[in-house]
Amino acid sequence: MDKLVIEGPCQLSGSVQVSGAKNAALPILMGCLLSETPVVLSNVPHLKDVTTTIQLLATMGVEVMFDEELNIEIDASSITTKEAPYELVKTMRASILTMGPLLARFGEAKVSLPGGCAIGSRPVNIHIEGMQKMGAEIKVEQGYIIATADRLVGADITMEPVTVTGTENLLMAAVLAEGRTTLRNAAKEPEVSDLANFLNKMGAKISGIDTDTLVIDGVEKLTGVSYRVIPDRIEAGTYLAAAALTQSCVTVKDVVPEHLTAVLDKFTEAGALITSTEDTITLDMRNRTLKPVNIVTDPYPDFPTDMQAQFVVMNCLADGEADVEETIFENRFMHVSELVRMGADIHVEGNVAHTKGVDHLIGAPVMATDLRASASLILAGLVANGETVVSRIYHIDRGYELIEEKFHKLGAHIYRAN
């Protein structure tokens, strides 16, 4: 099993190209099931979850082709099966997003209950209840959700709590439903908006994009388009956190700064100098003191849970004490025990991680437990004294494209080993 070996401490410099957003690409790939003609997608990251999604679509009879520029053509005009099997779904929660498109276009779906990162309970009851309100008959048998409907009908649905995948699934179900659907307390993440913009380009009628109330007037059919996936704001934030930790200056390119407003505010509070253009962000931490920052994770546009682990590492080396409160997932401090092995001073009580800054971390063998925890351990390795070996990096390959190559270009001493 692959490992990442990092020799620290590192000094970084230069620029890094941000890949397409995994959390936008996956629902958009599922959304291609709604189109009666081929769709061409660009800026899709080459990640394990994307590969799994393409395999999942292929098992349904979807034709998938790549051109020389690695654009992906998805042709779902003639699907042979409406099932998402456990063998593929077990590794990736986003597979649940096949349910809405299949049910909307074909009137049937059989989807295995999903797997994915072990970061807490992420129930699918909101997906099921929403589609039942739209007229679907749903039963759960032997680990599968089995849904049928002659044609979905519009409904007024309030989602509680806010759910990204729930919003996306019901949004895709609603675009071909008869009449108007209103989704209240909808997620406002940029990845949700990207899906909505993609669907509109295919002929859907969605209004209220970027707000917590989405109004969808159902249409008879959707047709294929060419579409470019938005950049990955969490990947961008991770490289900026690496620059802050190593007291370096790094520019992330092909990014949307507005998608990172809450994160950039915290970088500034931590003592970094931030400058942005229309599609770049530069963080300069040279000759500056890293300050501790208190953080509470909340749905967009507030501070994202997917940047929590990276800021915990920053606080470990900051000059003072800070609290990081996790409000989204109940099991997302699994990286803390590994950071403590590297010399960090962290105490977790409930959903709050209290850090006291230390002078340095010490390289050690550590084990990744989920996607963002993997990223935090790599960041710790970049700044620690000596060698850090991060095992179980299949987690990081689910969400970061060519991470060791990108860090190597920035000057890090990092390589992949068996």
Image (spheres, helix red, strand yellow):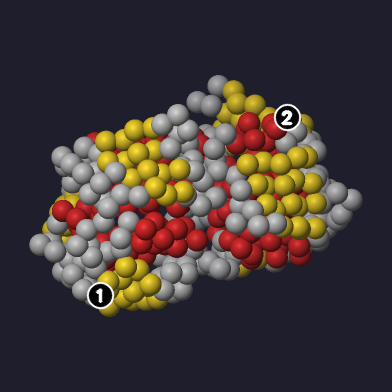
Q: Residue 256: horizontal and vertical position, in percent?
A: 60, 56
Residue 162 as seen in the image, left or right of residue 4: left
User: Mark 1 highlights which residue?
Assistant: 180
Label 2 sits on what residue type? His
Label 1 sits on what residue type? Arg
Give the structural element (helix, strand or loop) at label 2. Answer: strand
User: Mark 2 highlights which residue?
Assistant: 413
Give the structural element (helix, strand or loop) at label 1. Answer: strand
Residue 144 as seen in the image, left or right of residue 298: left
Taking the spot 78% from the left edge, 36% from the top edge, the residue there is 10
Residue 155 as seen in the image, left or right of residue 381: left
Q: Reading the chain from its start, which is encountered first: label 1 or label 2?
A: 1
Q: Which mark is residue 167?
A: none
Q: Residue 48: horizontal and vertical position, in percent?
A: 44, 36
Residue 332 as seen in the image, left or right of residue 177: right
Q: CA distance from mark 1 to mark 2?
A: 55 Å
**Residue 225 in view:** yes
The label nearer to you, 1 versus 2, is: 1
Q: Is residue 175 above or below residue 4?
A: below
